[in-house]
Image (cartoon, rainbow, N blue to C red):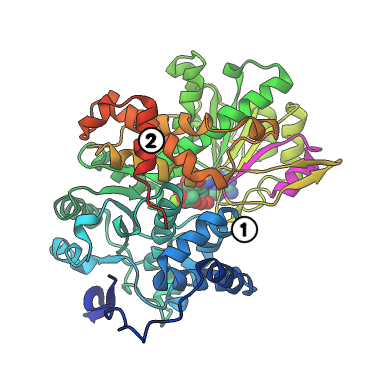
Amino acid sequence: MTIVLTPVWSNGTQKLKVISQTPPAPKRGLTPLALDESVHTVRCLNQLRSKDKSIEKYIYLFQLKDADPRMFYKLCLANMSEITPLIYTPTVGDACLQFSHIYRRPEGLFVSLKDKGNIGKVLRNWPRIDEARISVVTDGSRILGLGDLGLNGMPISIGKLSLYVAGAGIRPSSTVPICLDLGTNNQKYLEDPLYLGLRQTRPSPEVMTEFMEEFMHEMSVVFPKLLVQFEDFSTDKAFLYLDSFRNRYPVFNDDIQGTGAVVLSGFLNAAKLSSAASGLPLSEHRILFFGAGSAGVGVAMQLMSFFKLQGLSTEEARQRIWLVDSQGLIFDARGPLAEHKKYFSRRDYTGAPMTDLTEILKYVKPTALMGLSTIKGAFTQSVVETMSALNPCPIIFPLSNPVRLSECEFRDAVEWSQGRVIFASGSPFPEQEYNGRMLYPGQGNNMYIFPGLGLGAILSRAASVTDTMVEASSLGLADSLTEEEHAQGLVYPRIERIREISAQIARSVIRAAQRAGVDRSSDLRNLTDAELLEFVKSKMWYP
Ligand SMILES: NC(=O)C1=CN([C@@H]2O[C@H](COP(=O)(O)OP(=O)(O)OC[C@H]3O[C@@H](n4cnc5c(N)ncnc54)[C@H](O)[C@@H]3O)[C@@H](O)[C@H]2O)C=CC1
Ligand SMILES: CC(=O)C(=O)O
Ligand SMILES: [Mg+2]
């Protein structure tokens, strides 16, 4: 039974209210055409493929999900590599930018700043409270690399949750997409007559923190079995709210922890390939981050594990990482730094500020270059050629999303490195032929991690999401490549295997939760590894 929701406007505040339920099934004789499902699947796919533009395909899929969710997920599962870029990055970026214009009907829950003091009441509007298990919550303040999109960030919560369903078999009815409508500093939206959100600039950090405290408390009261994924909060808030809430509620930040885990996983495989070509011991890799926001620093923190797994101390691991932000190389003598940049700030460099990336590369001599800067084309020919002169197989991961903000395209990286690059990007690129050899780009995107991490946390009923659970998700992903995928030089498994991969990740996460003592499903402790994997698979929903 579907509940139909409609927006209600009161004092400029958007709320949702149940107005009707789907009509009862038609009486016999009035039943719709008896459809042959396999033929109808082809019909739906043809309708999708008949659209020229990605955004039209997004709108078609969004409406199909509303009208016939089983068919939507059936198409997703059978055509992962074709549909993921439509419901997720890069197309979801355009859907967010245009959300107030392409809006058809409500999906998800909007919680407005005007609801402060009454947030519990708003949450209780949700029609399937008992079934709720996972919520993706954004405040729209940094959607992908597109900046502050305010309420228009809702499609990112919806898109991530569609991947939870498709990728990890979470029941659609257990997902709760939430967008916090806290105003926007995006002047264009404030002036857009069709903009759906509050027409005011964002509140002070004090008001925001009061709001978040109430929101998280009420979420835990209304949805006692819910795991919360924070998504696309701007960097200052991303770190602040992860730190404030992670020991009080089951919550993780996808941009910091999910991205950290996915890049650690890809780097584990990439470093082996690169070291096989160069002979360099794994412990001697050197990683330069271009971009030092929530994603850059989150990944840098997680990559410390790579060096610790090679036997290095925490301090030795820190020494193998360099950060660059919009003002160049980050070093102590440069002047005051934002809190999250301090840990990796270099103490061993005291020269003049260095801003040119090629010059920085010549100084640092990294084996790996990570892009989390939102700066399109920042990895120029000179940058890729310098990396290629330093390394037989340079590791270059332009991870910014969506695709049009990528630091480098796969085609260029292949060309400029003469086919030697080990490459993964945040959004997908097509494969390339080089000198008769087919080369495959990896997709270093947290979409490989959060479905399995979330499933493991839900099934173990984890009271919190520990660092060890996040690391377990990463190692589980790194270990999931088949021999054929390794032989093709891949650093991530093929997305078509996402269900199988998510099950393995979930099992590793449950075991880590048990070791950390945060699991509340203690009966799972008695299962063997094989039994636990079967249990995880048995819990997956299939359309
Ligand atoms: N592949 C993946 O799974 C993920 C990718 N991302 C992407 O990472 C990007 C960054 O996200 P956040 O860290 O949250 O954003 P942010 O805006 O906080 O960070 C951007 C960083 O880039 C630096 N930067 C900006 N201009 C620069 C320039 N000209 N030269 C050098 N550095 C420059 C800034 O100083 C800042 O440190 C976004 O595009 C996002 O889509 C984020 C999460 C996951
Ligand atoms: C992938 C993702 O979470 C981001 O770009 O923000
Ligand atoms: Mg994100």
Q: Nearer the viewer, residue 45 or 437?
A: 45
Indicate the quadrant containing the N terminus: top left, top right, bottom left or bottom right.
bottom left
Residue pictured at 40% horizontal, 71% vertical: 66
Q: Is residue 418 magenta?
A: yes
Q: Residue 534, labelled with which disc?
A: 2
* Disc 1, SS: helix
Indicate the quadrant containing the C terminus: top left, top right, bottom left or bottom right.
bottom left
Q: Is residue 221 positioned above or below 242 on the image?
A: below
- Residue 238 screen position, x and y as percent: 36, 47
Q: Which residue is mark 1?
A: 404
Residue pictured at 48% horizontal, 39% vertical: 501
Q: Residue furthest right?
A: 435
Q: Is residue 321 positioned above or below 43 on the image?
A: above
Gap between marks 1 and 2 measured at Cα? 40 Å
**Residue type highlighted by circle 1:** Arg
**Residue type highlighted by circle 2:** Glu
Q: Quadrant of residue 186?
A: bottom left
* Disc 2, SS: helix
Magenta residues, start to end:
409-426
- Residue 154 screen position, x and y as percent: 39, 64
In the displayed structure image, the side of residue 489 where residue 492 appears, left or right? left
